[in-house]
Structure formats: structure tokens, C-alpha cells
Image (cartoon, coloured by chain):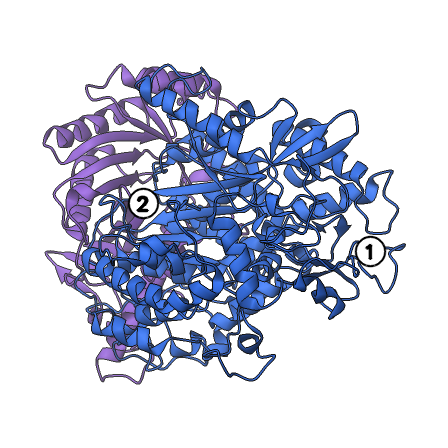
Amino acid sequence: MGLLALGTALEWPEAKQRAHQVREWGIEQLLAIWNRAKGKERDALLWGDEVEYLVVAVDEHAKKARLSLAQADILKSLARDEALWKSDGGENQDGTGAGAEPPHFHPEFGRFMLEATPAKPWGIDFKDLLKVEGNMKRRREVAKAHMASNEYPITMTTFPRLGTKDDYIQPYYPPSGPALRSQFVPDEIANPHIRFPTLAANIRSRRGRKVELNVPVFKDTNTPSPFKDPTVNYDLHIWPEDDDVRNGAAKDDHVYMDAMAFGMGSCCLQITFQAKNINEGRKLYDQLSPLGPILMALTAATPIYKGFLVDTDSRWNQISRAVDDRTPEELGELPLKNDRWRIPKSRYASNSTYISQDPRLRKEYLDPDLVVDEDIKKRLIEGGMDDLLATHFAHLFIRDPLVIFSEDLEELDLNKADHFENLQSTNWQHMRFKPPPPEKNDIGWRVEFRSMEVQMTDFENAAFSIFIVLVTRAILSFDLNFYIPIQRTTENMETAHARDGVLDSKFYFRKDPFPRRVRRQQHSSNGSNMSSATSSAVNTPPPSPPLAPVEMEYDLMTISEIINGSTDGSFPGLIPLVESYLDSVNVDVETRCSLASYLDLIRKRADGTLWTGARWIREYVAKHPAYKQDSVVSEEICYDLVKAVDEMAVKEGKNGSVGWEMLRGKKK
Amino acid sequence: MKLVLSTSNLMKGGGSSVIRRPTTEKSNVELINALRSNFQASQHESSNGSSSSNGTSSTATNGYKSWTSEHDGTLYIPARDFSQPGLSEERPQYDITVKLFYLPGIPVSRRCAHTREAIDLVLKELDVDSIDLLIVSFPGILFDAEDDSEDEDEATEGEDTGANEGQVQQPDDFDSMVQTWRTLEKLQSEGMISQLGVAEFGSERLARFLAHTNVKPSVDQINLKDCCVVPKSLILYAKQEHIQLLTHNDCNDILPVGTTRELLGPGESGAGILASAPDKNDGIQGDVEPQWVVKYTAVVKDRGVVENKGYFALADIGNCVRTES
């Protein structure tokens, strides 16, 4: 996340008073952007990946692994190097990159986290794709070079013992600070930039109590039943919110957590694409949306929270709950009195809108319960925006802005996007549609794919990044249609959490992804937006034969069927689609071979030949001599696990080294 | 009479014909399926468009005439669709690659005309006046990753290239390849083609070939069944000569005679172009002889989007075609 300028951040009661103004100004800024950029055309495909790291300090003597809160020092040191590189005219770097521009590092919510992006966005030149993995490795090396010798950048989604009773952070701070009021983590766990503690405090404050995360515990043979989270302290009386647990916040058979850090402290792998124009961006937003849960299940890597094995494999719902600022009225626990509406989802959730002006988008695919701010929608339509897109933003803008700097409320600047971004970037949905930033002419409409979990090795992170890029090229080339009712995607997102869901669960997916054949003599003059639809389409369609009921269009499929194709050949599979795409373009031998190894990883993750990260971590814990079959991931296990993951990032499971079950599938 | 078979744009509505299925061995299914589905769709549309029949394809004699067109002794199957918009953006945005398959058993002397004919069709289809890369595929050459030192005098590939058609297949001899290349060089010098390429050349053949060229091939396209077993000698040699090694997944025997007959013939899977028996008047009489196949792709350069991909195939038909042995 980009950092805003420092200022006076308003506390919640005051921020709430100004929320309306921020929304109004945000909408005016959006309209200004929209009117400037709606005709932007022919932007190249550029894309970027974001990899997030935990900084873990390893204590060889005590055999302990702890999260390091050294983020600020590391970033400062990295920034010095970047400045040095620039002052050197960009030449003669330290040798590893031979003068290449250093990668960019960014702070994240957790003070134990780093985010790194490539120096420049990637293009679609296939040789560019080959540079991704090396660049990711270089980022890891550069990050490591700026850490203390016992610190490591680790790409696990969560630190296994975050929030336990032991000294899992370095330097140590006791919990129960004024911002988070967590009984498990100190305020110092968050980035000290005023934005972050304010964000956490205002979420808590708006909500009227602490955030509440209950993850079902994995019941092993020696796990007590019912399981009562032994780390919960019921006798704490520092903050009013300490009553939460006495009021039943911690549920039986669940691991209980109470702070934003348990969610926003997770590492993800996010990919952003630049579209050629707004229409292509809207199309990609819609078509990638059903893939979100599928890719999340494939990348699942989060089986441990707060020192316990849990019964889910993915991080998503925990983040969702960690930033859930809904009031009891909005949650439906109390009758609506002060708030404007019931809201079915957290601000961090699967997305709820389709926005493409595609004749194939049927009304039945839209969320019938979508909450929309009608006044905002009206304003957007008056301002010239079409109904679909106005609905999308009027839906995002049902939320309150959480962090408001009083200095920004003095004058509305239509050449900025700060108020718009205040809402836009705190709607953490699994897809994000990003308008061009007003200050940069060379950036176009973008779509961000946000559901993937970070993988332990850069080989995997590169594989999944490149796979998604190739999928977008196949979508655009074959004019694929993955539409399903958006509520099915929401359900899929839940399904994707299941332990081993990648193999055992079934997901709703569209049966026939191919466009209907274009009738000859019926081409639209610009060659796009072909295809037919019926009276149920949202967008004005050409007359056409009636379509089957929506329920006939999709089916429950396994991840393997979706990725590799169904055995009876009825669904082609994403990998065969990508391969057919590759067969249609000129790819050199070396590139094709590298791509083959990436596609092979994904193929085998889907069919179970290779383990997911979640599975591998579970097996690692289960086989550890110190594990007592009681779901507890002890400090000793955590230490060994982190060491193993670091070793894996280097050896990548080659020659039977650690992680081969996840990366290679064979020992030799 | 000549027959021009076309697929139209596979990327838009070609549907599942473009998908390589792991279960199918033969990779010419793309061409065959695409032709078949384009024929069927055109038949369907024409029978829906006219009120002559009730939704099923017409069974009247010479029903194919409703969805094909004849022009200067050439029958277009289906009829050329001049309402096709060509490419949606300006020419410089695209990389246009054309691969021309010279078919086995067709005299080398016809290649000059064939090449012009094929390129001409593609240029018209895409509404452009030049292509970026022309790759030619000579019949009977198989790239063998295990043994890069293939000897083209030994005709060992007979069983792969058409034995099931009862033909005796001779791989192209070296001189005829060089002779063909002269034609291509000429087209290149006319500005119609920017770069030339070959397919399935091993390093030795490539070295021998280069010595005879004025315009060097800039591409050697090889079929990697099992990826990543490319002979080192070829990689090194290609690098040294600045020849790009590209991959493809095309079939060596892309359009056998039997398949063509089946496609065009009467019956369930046929298009009803050919007469059902020598004494029947329900279609064109005579032998079918496929002459060449051309594949074209137009890719938007800086976005990697394949906008148009399709095939043309040309076959001779009639009693005047060369009798098969």
C-alpha cells in the first residue's frame, strides 16, 4: 500500500462526521478521472507482481524464530541503496544485477513485513516472462542483504506463532496497547506510520468492539474436545474491549484472535494488469473474478494460526474479519436505527459486482442483494457514467472512510485522487478495478487480481504470476466467457478455505467458456463485443435465440477439472487453453520450456501430484518429533519450520531437498 | 477446378476446435475440426437464412451452392465473406505470421504459384499488404531431437507422412528446397514479407542450407513433443547464426487426401461437395488432391492478444488432376 503524506489523522467520532464529505469529494475526483481517462486507448499490456515477506529473526542459541520489527531500518537502508543507484546514473550496481534498476520495496501494515515489486512493470514479450523468477530471487537477495545477519525474508502467509504468549517479536513489546487493545499483540506490531494505528483503532471504534477472528481448530488425536483456546485471558481489565471475551467472543473449538494484525499481517501474491482501454479492463475484471477462489485454493498456504493447526487452508476469511468495521446494526445483530443499511460482507471480501459492458453479462449473474448508495449512483450517472460502473462505485462507497487527515478537507483538488482512493483502497475485494492515477499520464486502466496466497519459493510465485498473465491473454484472444452468478463466486470463496479443498472440494464453474459463434454478416464494425445474448443481458444485445436457464450454464467441478480439463472433455481446462494460446503465438524454445515447467507445477498442484503449501506445512508439523498430535505448533517446531522454509527458498525441492513433495513430486 | 477451404477466424467462435486435448494424438485436429465446424456453421446459416428448408441442412442436389461461391474456376468453401472487417487496429500494431505447408507429392514446380496464391489469400483475408514472417514447411522433414544429424537422402519417414493413404512419400530433396527458397527470396525482395523461416531443420541441414541462401532464414520452427530436449548443437548453431528457434505444435501431415475426401464428401461428417458415386449427379466428380495449407495468425504486438488465426487449404479436383500411383 502506498503511504499518504503525514498529517493530523482524525479519531473515529470526528472522522465519522466528515465521512460524507470525503465520499462526496471522492466521487467528484472519480468523475474527473473518468472524464479524463475514459477514452484512453491502446495502452500496452504491462503487469506487475507484488510479493510480500515476513522478516523473521532466527535465534540459533535459544532455537527460536521471532518476527523482526526492523521494517523501518530495512526500508531506510534499501532506500539509501536506491538513491545511490540513481546518483550513480544507474550503472555499476553491486554486481548481482549488473546495473539493473533495484527493485522497489514498500512498507506494509505489519511492522514485520516488506513488500517488493519489480523496478519496472513487465510486458508481454515472452522473454520478459523468463525474467520474473530471477527478479523475484534478486528481490529476496536484496532484501536479505539489508537485514541483520540472522534475519530472513520468509514468504509464508502468516507467522505460525504470531500472538502467542511467548516473545515472538523482536524487540519485545507487551500486548494491550491503546490502538489495537489486543490481548495478544502489542500496538508496536503495526507500522508506526500514523495511518496504520489509526486504521486499526478506527475499525475497532466504528465496530464498537474489537475485531473477532475465530478459526476452527484442526482436531488431531490428542486435541482436547471441546477445544477452548488456552491462550485467551478472561481476567484482563485494561480496556473496555477486554470484556469482549467475557461476552463470548472466543468460540469453542476455535482459535480466537482479536486484532487487525492477525489478518493484515498476512502475505499475499497480487498481480496487477494494465488493460488497453477501459473496456478491456472491465472485461478482465469480470472474467478473472470467477478464477479468484480457484487460484486461492491452488495456492493455499495458511494452516497455522497463533501456534495451532487450524482446519482451514487459506488466509482470506481471517483478513476479512480482521478489518471488519461493520456495526452490530450493519451486521444484522440489532435492528437498523442509526446506520443506513445491513451489509452482508466485510470491506475485505470477494467482490460483488460485474462491470463489463459485455452482451454476455446476464442480469441473473448480478448480486440481487447488492447494497448501493443510490445518491452516489445518481451523481455518477449525472456525471456521465454508465449504470453498471456507477453501480460498482456506488457499492464501494457504501463504506465510511477510515483514515481522514484534517488537512485534506480544506479544499477539493480535482487533480488528485486522495479522497477517491480513501474509499477505493480500503475496499479490499478479491478483484480491484483501478482507474488511471490523475498525476501520471502514462498509466492506464488496471485490474488487480488479489486472491492468491504467497508461496514459499520464488519458483512458485513466478509460476502463478505468469500463469495468470497467460490466462488473461487466453481470455482476450479466445474471447472466453467465465461468467457465473456472482453469488456462486462468493460461495466458492468459502469453499476454497476447506482443508485440502484443492483436491476434495467442488467449485461452481461455467461449463462452456467459448463464445458463441459470430454469425457471418453480423460483425460489429470494430470487431469487438461480438457474441450474442438474450433479453436477460444487462447491456443492449442484438436479437438472438433464447439462452438456457442460468443454472444450466455452470456446474460443480473439481480444481483439477477446472485447471486440467474434465476427463470427458466437456470442459477444456485452463491449462489446455493457455497451451492453445501459446501454440498460436511465436514462442522461442527456451521460453516455452520454462513456461512448461511453470504450467507443470500448476497442473500437478491441481491434480494432487504436488502438495499445496498448506498440505506441506501440515505434514511437516505432523512428522516433527516434538509434535504431540494436539494441534500445537510449539516454538521448537516453528523454529525448524521457518528454517526449512528458508532452505526451501534456496534449494527449491531439487534432488530430494526439503519441500520436494510440493515442488517436484519426486525425490531424485 | 480449384477448391479453397477456409476456417475463418478460429479465435472468435471457433470454440473447442482450437483446444489441444491431451487425449488426441494428432495435432492436425485443429485444422480438420475448424474446417468442419466452419462448413457446418455456414451450411446452417444459409439454410436458416433461406426459407427453403426447415432448419436442417438442405438435401437438394448441389445444395452446397447456397453456402459456397464460385469465381474464376475456384470454388470457395465456404463462400468468401467480404463483410469480415479485417484487423481492428492499424497494421503496425500486429505481428502477422504465416506458415505455409507444402504438401507431399505435389511437384516442386508448382510451389512458386502456390506460394503467391496462399500469401494472396491471407493478405486479402486480413486486409493488409504485407506479412512479418513466412515460415515454410517442406513435406517429409521430421525434426528428430534424439538425432540431430539426420540424413535427408534416406526416406525413413514414409510411415508418418501418408502411408495410410497408400502413397509412397519422398521427402523433399535438398535442391528443390533451395529452388523453393529462391521464390521466397523474390517475394521478400518485393516487400511482401519481412522475414523468412523454415521448419524442422536440424543443425546440419541448416548449415548446408544457409550456404545456398541469399536471404537467411531468421526462424527455425521446431515441434517439441517432449519439451526441452533440443540438441545443444542446434541451439548453439542457431545462436551463432542469429536464427530464432521457435516452437510449434503442427502436424507433419496436416491434410491427408483421405481426410480431405471425408471432409468434402457426402455422408454424416462431410460437406456434401463431392459426388457420392461416379455415376451420381449430387456433387463434383473427380479426384481430390490437396495442394497446400496455409496458417495465419495476427497478434497484437504489445498486448500478446491473438486477434485472428485461421487456415486456408487449396485442393485441386477433377479428372485432370494427376492420377495417384
Which residue, given by chain and number where applicable, does mark 1 sit on? A230
- Chain in blue (letter): A
Q: Give percent across and percent down for residue B55.
A: 32, 82
Q: Where A297 sits versus A391, above or below?
A: above
Q: Where A570 sits versus B231, above or below?
A: below
User: At numbered mark 1, what does the secondary structure look like: helix, strand or loop?
Assistant: loop
- The quadrant holding residue B218 is top left
- The quadrant holding residue A666 is top right
**The disc label shown at residue A45, or none:** 2
Q: Residue at x 19, y 30 (%)?
A: B184
Q: Give percent across and percent down for residue A476.
A: 34, 54
User: At numbered mark 2, what does the secondary structure look like: helix, strand or loop?
Assistant: loop
Number of numbered labels in the structure image: 2
Residue A594 visible here:
yes
Q: Nearer the viewer, mark 2 or mark 1?
A: 1
**Neighbours of disc 1 within 10 Å: few (<14), some (14-19), many (20+):** few
Q: Give percent across and percent down for residue B313.
A: 27, 50
The image quadrant where one finds the C terminus of chain A is top right
Inspect the image, locate mark 1, and give the three-letter code of the amino acid beneath it: Pro
Inspect the image, locate mark 2, and give the three-letter code of the amino acid beneath it: Leu
Relative placement, left or right, of A513 versus A149 is left
Depth order, front residue of B65/A23: A23
Q: Residue at x 69, y 60 (%)?
A: A504
> Considering only order in the chain, which callout, 1 or 2, is on the residue closer to the N terminus?
2
- Chain in purple (letter): B
